[in-house]
Structure formats: structure tokens, C-alpha cells
Amino acid sequence: MVSSTSLEPVIELRGVEKHYQMGDTLVKALRGVDLRIYPGDYISILGPSGCGKSTMLNILGCLDQPSVGQYFLDGIDVSKLSDDNLSQVRGKKLGFIFQSYNLIQQLTVVENIEVPLYYQGLSEKESREIAVDLACRVGLSKRLDHKPTELSGGQQQRVAIARALSNDPAVILADEATGNLDSKSGGDILEIFDQLNADGKTLILITHDEGMSKRTSRTIRLKDGEIAFDSRREEVTA
Amino acid sequence: MSVPVLIRELSFFRLKRSVLLGLKSLWLHKLRSLLTAMGIVFGVCSVIAMLAIGEGASHEAQQQIKELGSQNVILRSVKPTNKTTAGEQERSLILEYGITYRDISQIQATVPGVLVTIPARELKDFIWNEALSIDGSTRGTVPWFPDMRNRKVQRGRFFTQIEMDTRAPICVLSRSLARHLFPLSEPIGDTVRIQSSYFRVIGVIQDDPAVANSSEEKGATGATDQGAAMEMLIPITTLEDHFGEVLFKYRSGSFEAEKVELHEATVRIDTPDRVMPAAEAIRHILERNHKDVDYTMVVPLDLLRRAERTKQIFNIVLGSIAAISLVVGGIGIMNIMLATVTERTREIGIRRALGAKKKDIVMQFLIETVMLSGAGGLLGVALGLLIPIIITHFAQMETIIQLWAPILAFSISVMTGVLFGIYPAFRAAGMNPVEALRHE
């Protein structure tokens, strides 16, 4: 992955701060974060609770916008985009995998995978083909028409992975993706992540599980809203 | 984000998907959806049913008034109430009141547009067929009476000019009277008796629609319900011949004598638009000729117009009730949609994270609301069409369903859905995706 330094970064944060008003006090959840993530990176963002991990995820996932600073995603400055354009960016460039799977309960496996494609305006036939193909890739070919409630946790998370892949995103964000799973299912999921990275996908795993850092090629530690450690920077400076 | 923009963005494919999605989530909560739609169902159904009943009732009333003849002005003599208490009463035992031949000739001479007049006299006494009798009214009139008053001769025939000129002792019975006096036998050819005079029955005529049905008429003539329907028609000349100018009436223990020249006169005007001015002119003549108000004037056209005005008011009242019931239904829908939005906060967050724009969320919830109210509207239309049929079948009431009523009610129900769906939909779309995703 060393060669990736020569590439344009897929994500670039420049002096990003995020402030929240909590009653009378102004809370700074992020205090000037500078970060570059390159295509093909496999990153774990670690840190204790309250260190700004969730805020980081929201900013990286374009669910929230920085109070100060700039955020370039795939070359686009998304820190000043309108709500509609931000939605479009999320739908096109990002894939989300959540701790609690966040599948829509009344939809089947295939329909859940199709949701991002629907908002991209793909035809029913196209999106069905993509969804079925992805479901097979994550090993759910026999569960296409099942509802999430009929699936195990590991299976649900695999649906979520397929969904995150459906729009062929530039970056996949996983928030404590194995947090709700037993070690066996969690291991299976992580193996899928390894495979995806091997296929060239950019993955960002946000976790408090120290074990993750051994798996990923780059580790970033957050502390009090700042980057306390970045394995790449260590490499570069070393 | 305006509505035209929403519509432009909405391709057929998206609409189809949104509708399917809406159906799915409504189907997920079948009972809730059904109960929510009920408000609209009953609103729409009651609007259609009430309109049908109202339309039917007013049609019936208008039909009755039309049967009186819309080009007619009907004058009737009424026993004045103040005469019985005045001192005049002591001087003469014979009560003299009512419309006179002089009135009629003046009307005919001065009021423009008067075609014909039908004078009629009336005698209230028992009518006998051997041992059967009834307290009815005997009316002396002219041969063109059935035509002018739109009354059909059901059996036999009406009397002719020659019979009137020759003062023939013949009569035509109203259907009710014929039934009463001749329950088993054929009345035509038989005879009936009043006091000491005998009359041969030559025909049976339909009952007076005004007295048979309208209470307003009953009040004006002062006749009892039964007595008014029990009517015998004889030539006016014959009536004069047999009973004279002064009509005597013997009752058990009492005796009444009245001198009334004409009990009733029908004035026919040539065109409908001259009826109201003519009625006004006739009123002036009568006011000048009569010190006491011993007559009444019925203008069927005026009644018809009043009936139409009543119907308009009725429609306004109905419209308000309909509007209220649909607002109530709409509030019910809005309430549930707001609850649904809260319940599905997580789903909204997920969709927003996966690329849904605000307008996608607005459309999703708006379509759901409109489907709910539209389905309620359809069900309401079905029930609303059924109820008048049931009412007509079981209550023998006339009901009329006009084509626009179900169409209007359904469109209003859909509009209610849009109107009351907008707020919940925008509330859903306005949610912060981060908070929505965190929602438990």
C-alpha cells in the first residue's frame, strides 16, 4: 500500500472541527483534524468512547458537516454542499455498515440491497440484477426473499455489506460492524472486509476493538477530538 | 421544495416503486390502516348518501308542486277567524265569505296573461253509498278541471260541457272515496247520495296530490287529511241547482249555513315568467275586494322556487357537514401519519444515509397518506352508493345519486390525504439523519 501515496487522496480533511452547543457550553467534538485517505486504504479508527469517533464517522459519512475546515471526498468539497447534494454524494460515493445492521424491516434481503440503487434512479431490472448478484457474493443466495427478522445477526450484517457495495462506492464506512456479533460471525464478516480490501476497496472501520488494528493496514487513534496516532504518519516520519 | 418540482422528479418507475412500498407498509399494519381510513370512509359515504336522499326528497317535493301546475295560481276561500267573534255574527245566521264571481271576472278582465279560470265550489257533507258513508267534500267544478290541475282520470271519464250545461246529476269520485264507498263493487254506473240528492258515478280520478301529501295545503284549506282526500267532483251548475247559494250542513246536534260563491278558483297564466307578476296583480285585486282575509293564494311556481331555495340551503348544510367530517377524517390520518413517522424514524435515517433526498422522503410519506385516504375514499364511495339503494328498497324513499357526487367526494378524500399528509411528510423529511439513525 506504500505506492498509494502517489495517488490523489479519496478523502482529505483539512483542519476539520465540529462544535456542538450543549446548553450554555460549546463542546468541541473534533478539534482540527487533518487526514488523507488514499484509494485502497484499509483503515481502523480507534479510540475510547467520547473521543469523537461518532462525530468523525458522521463527518466522513457526509451525514453531518464540519463547523470549521474543509472535507474533500473524491475531489469534491462536500463541507459546503446543500442537503440534496449531500444526499446524492452519500448515495453515490459512500457505503455504510452499521453495528445494528440498520436494515429496513418490511423489505426482503434483495429489496434492502436495492435501496441505494433506487435513489440513484436505476431501473427495476438493473437494480434487481445487481442486488441478486451481491446477495450471492455474500453467501445469501438461498435467502433472497427473506425478511431481516428471519435472518441471524451475521446474515443481516452480510445483507448490510451487500447493500453498502450495491452502488460501487468510493469508500465503505463500517461503524462497529462486528460489535453485535459473536466471534465466529464477526470473524466471517472481517474476512469479507479483508477480501473487499484485497479487491481494491477503500474501507474505514470505526471501532473500539484494539484487535482490529492488527488486521488493517493503517491505524488511526483519536483522543479528545484530535488524531493522537496515525500509523501512516509514523511510517512517513520514521 | 415545491410540489411541481416533486412531480417533475417523479418518473413512472419511481411512482410505481413508491406505491408498492406504501402498500407494503400500510399492509404491515392492516388494522391500523383500516381504522385510520375509516374516518374518510364514513365522511365520503355520508356525503354521497345524504346528497342522494336530499336530492330524492326535494325531487319528490318538486314533483308534487309541479302536479299543481306551475302556470297556475290557486285561490281558495277560507272561513275568516275574526268573523265568528264579531257582533256581525248575531245579525245573520248565515256566514258569508270567500272568493266571488266578481273577483274572478275582474281578474280575467284586468290581469294580463290569464288564459282560463276554473271556478269551484265545495260542499262539506256526508257522502253515502247505501249504508256506507264518509264525511267528504263535494266540489262543483268545470270540465277542464283535470287538465288544468294535472289530475288523471283513472277509470271512466270526466263530465263534459254539455253535462255541465244541462246540470246533469253525475259525479266523479276521487280514488280514496271510491275505495271507501265501493270497497267491493264497481263504482261506475252506481249512485251516491248527498243529503237528498243522488248522483251517478261516471269516473274515478286520482287523489289531489296537494292534499294527499302536502301539509302546507292542508293548513290552508283547513280540511282534515281524510276529508280532503275524500273528494267528489260534480258540475258546478249541478251543485248550485241541488244545494243553492247557501250551503247548509247538518251535523249531530248542530247546524251550519255558509254562503260562499266560490270555494276555489284556479287561474291559469299563459307563460311561466308571467306567473309571478300576475299573482301580484291578483293579490291586489283580492285585497281591494275583501275587507277580511277570507281567501288564500297558492302559487305553485312560488312554492317551487322556495323549494329550490330550501334545497340550496340543504346543500350548503350538507356541504358543511361533509367538510367537517372530511376534516375530522383528515386529522385522524394526520395523527396516525405523525405517529408512523416517529415510529419509522430509524428507517428514515437509513434511507437518508443511503442517498434519499428530502423530497424522496416527502414523496414516500405523501404517497402513503394519499393511498390511505384514496382507499378510504373508494370504500366510502362504494358504501355511499349502496346505502341509498338500501334506503330505497326498505324505506320506499326516493333517492337520486348524481354522477358528480361520488366523483366529488372521492376527489375531496384524495385532496384531504394530500393536505393532511404534507405536514407529517415534511416532518419526516426534515429529520436530522444522524439523530434519526440513532433513534431507538
Image (cartoon, coloured by chain):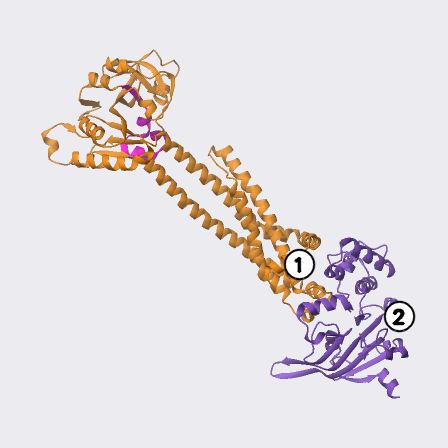
Residues at marks 1 and 2, CA–CA distance in whole angstroms: 39 Å
Q: Position of residue B144 (x, y in %)?
A: 31, 21
Q: Position of residue B378 (x, y in %)?
A: 59, 45
| Disc 1, SS | helix
Q: Position of residue B149 (x, y in %)?
A: 33, 26
Visible residue check, residue B293 = no
Given residues B219 and A134, the one toward you in this image is: A134
Which quarter shows the C terminus of chain B?
Answer: bottom right
Given residues A105 and A132, the one toward you in this image is: A132
- At label 1, the amino acid type is Glu
Locate residue B28 relative to residue B185 in the image: left or right.
right
- At label 2, the amino acid type is Asp
The letter of the purple chain is A
Circle 2 chain? A
Visible residue check, residue A177 = yes
Q: Is there a contact, CB below 8 Å, between mark 1 and mark 2?
A: no
**Magenta span covers which residues?**
B210-234
Above or below, B155 against A83 in this view is above
Whether the magenta-drawn stretch holds residue B255 is answered as: no
User: Do discs 1 and 2 belong to a common subunit?
Assistant: no
Magenta part mainly helix, strand or loop? helix
Task: Name the quadrant containing residue B89.
Answer: top left
Q: Which mark is residue A194?
A: 2
Task: Name the residue at the bottom extreme.
Answer: A238
Q: Which mark is residue B9?
A: 1
Above or below, B70 against B47 in this view is above
Identify the colour of chain B in the image: orange
